[in-house]
Amino acid sequence: MRTQRQVVDYSLQKRALLRDLHNGRVGTLEVCDASPYLKNAARFHGEPTDDRCPVCRRDNLTLVHYIYGDELKQSAGQARKLAELPVLAMTLREFQVFVVEVCQSCAWNHLTEQYLLGRDALSTDELVRDEPARGEAVASSSSGRHRETGSSSHRWEGRR
Ligand SMILES: [Zn+2]
């Protein structure tokens, strides 16, 4: 999605956790603890992937997209289908998306990334492209300068 911004990637943390798991520093039960809610969200709203679960390798991972933000009101914290996000991004100014990968076999789950979506990104793009804000600022400051020089030159004339 081209409007994604402030993207935070958690793949490093995930790799570190998997390393700890393979070294035996972390138990499988500690990392394969997807709640029934998360598993349901994966089943009903999840985005299937071609990636095998890094823990059990029995099933492919499912990505669940959780949305947060004041504008969402009672929908905040809900899981949404990936296809619904562009629609929300057109109607809301800004909301946060958390992407969680889930294995429906062994309950492995991990936050993969988070980012912001919303119309705010679109309007910023337009500002950069058309630069109306900067144009206005230049216009107002130059007109202010005109007024100043005008009055000072009048004063000069008066003193002469
Ligand atoms: Zn698994």
Image (tube, rainbow, N blue to C red):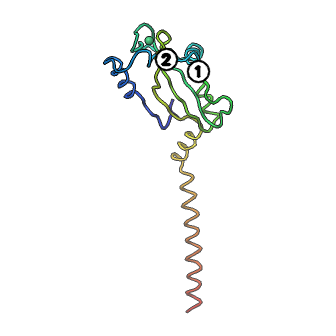
Q: How many numbered discs sit on the rendered protein?
A: 2
The amino acid on which the numbered mark 1 sits, given as a three-letter code, is Lys
Question: The C terminus is located in which quarter?
Answer: bottom right
Give whichever of 39, 79 is nearer the camera.
39
How far apart in space, not on screen, are marks 1 and 2 (Cα)?
22 Å
Query: Does 58 appear above or below 42?
Result: above
Q: For residue 81, which numbered disc appears in the image?
A: 1
Q: For residue 33, which numbered disc appears in the image?
A: 2
- Mark 1 nearby-residue class (10 Å; few <14, some 14–19, many ≥20): some
Q: Is mark 2 within 8 Å of ligand 1?
A: no
Query: Does 49 appear above or below 70?
Result: above
Residue name at image x 55 percent, y 15 percent: 39
Rendering coords of residue 128 (x, y %): 51, 47
Residue 73 lies in what quarter of the image?
top right
Query: Does 159 appear above or below 10?
Result: below
Residue 77 lies in what quarter of the image?
top right
Rendering coords of residue 58 (x, y %): 42, 7
Q: What residue occupies the far left of the structure in this picture?
A: 23
